[in-house]
Image: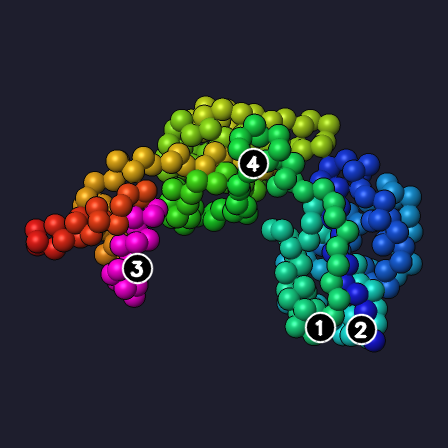
């Protein structure tokens, strides 16, 4: 009978935020796969527990190679506990490959819910929380970063990012360029730790603040794009959107209906725009 893979959330700062079940799982696990075994030792010391199982490292550099070993242990009936440095495994941390492999082998996967920098920052940001999307870390190279930001420039949902402190200045500057200098955002630093700080304001102001240097773990929350009034879309733009959908293989009738729905205008208005654009050629 196969074992169980347990994904356990760990504190993002304050050890007292650890859920009680985490301590129980640390003691019960046959194998503990940790992103950083030194941090695991500090955590277990803070919690006052002594793991009985085997501890192995499981980080970005050995994730692919170690996954088959852990799946073999799971297939043999072991209870494998996966923990990362902070927060939930798989969320911009190791874990996805092991979960996918366990699911493929019909091995039970469960979780010990715990702290999340994404949800904590979102809740503290003061920005809309009814709909949001997590974008993880942006690319390090300037061109690739700008390309990624342009892909979500029209995203209506609140955006959440992780960022390294030494790149925060460049990232906020790029966001101000792509999203607009006045788009609201919040920079959440050192969440749940001694020097926790949440800086809120327009992207241009946050970029100026970050230029002076920022330290610690960073989560950035950015307001979604404002709704575009239907009347702001000119006939040429309606026709262009239909053409883009058609070039992707969508039937014209379906493309017109889709564009009308997203623009909030009658289908006849979109049809007339398409005819006008075709006549003008």
Mark 1 and mark 2 in contact? Answer it, CB < 8 Å.
yes
Query: Which secondary structure class fits the magenta region best?
Result: helix
Q: CA distance from mark 3 to mark 1?
A: 40 Å
Distance CA(mark 3)–CA(mark 4): 32 Å
Q: Earlier in the sequence, mark 3 or mark 4?
A: 4
- The mark that comes first in sequence, 4 or 1, is 1
How would you rate the neighbour count of disc 4 (Cα within 10 Å): few for under 14, some for 14-19, many for 20 or more?
some
Q: CA distance from mark 4 to mark 2?
A: 39 Å
- Quarter of the picture holding the C terminus: bottom left
* Spot occupied by residue 98 in the image (x, y as percentages of width and height): 68, 65
Q: Residue 166 lies in what quarter of the image?
A: top right
Q: Which mark is residue 250?
A: none
Find disc 2 in the rendering and name its residue: 2
Could you tell whether 203 is left or right of 7 in the image?
Answer: left
Mark 4: secondary structure: loop
First to last magenta residue range: 245-262
Front position in the image: 268 or 11: 268
Residue 101 relative to residue 108: left or right: left
Mark 4 sits on what residue?
Answer: 129
């Amino acid at each position: 009978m196969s074992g169980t893979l347990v994904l356990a959330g760990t504190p993002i700062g304050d050890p007292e935020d650890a859920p009680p079940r985490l301590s129980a799982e640390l003691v019960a696990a046959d194998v503990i796969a940790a992103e950083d075994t030194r941090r695991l030792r500090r955590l277990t010391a803070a919690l006052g527990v002594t793991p009985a199982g085997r501890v192995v490292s499981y980080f970005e550099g050995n994730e692919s190679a170690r996954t088959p070993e852990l799946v073999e242990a799971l297939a043999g009936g072991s209870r494998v506990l996966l923990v990362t440095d902070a927060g939930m495994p798989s969320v911009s941390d190791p874990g996805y490959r092991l979960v996918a492999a366990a699911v493929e082998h019909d091995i039970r996967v469960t979780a010990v819910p715990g702290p999340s920098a994404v949800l904590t920052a979102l809740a503290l940001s003061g920005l809309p929380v009814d709909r949001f999307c997590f974008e993880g870390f942006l690319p390090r190279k300037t061109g690739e970063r700008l390309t990624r930001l342009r892909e979500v420039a029209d995203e209506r949902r609140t955006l959440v990012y992780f960022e390294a402190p030494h790149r925060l200045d460049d990232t906020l500057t790029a966001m101000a360029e792509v999203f607009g200098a006045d788009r609201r955002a919040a920079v959440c630093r050192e969440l749940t730790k001694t020097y926790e700080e949440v800086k809120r304001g327009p992207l241009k102001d946050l970029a100026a603040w970050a230029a002076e240097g920022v330290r610690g773990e960073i989560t950035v929350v950015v307001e979604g794009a404002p709704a575009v009034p239907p009347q702001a879309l000119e006939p040429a733009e309606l026709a262009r959107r239909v053409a883009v959908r058609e070039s992707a293989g969508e039937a014209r009738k379906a493309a017109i209906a889709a564009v009308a729905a997203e623009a909030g205008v009658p289908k006849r208005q979109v049809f007339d725009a398409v005819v006008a654009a075709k006549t003008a050629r």
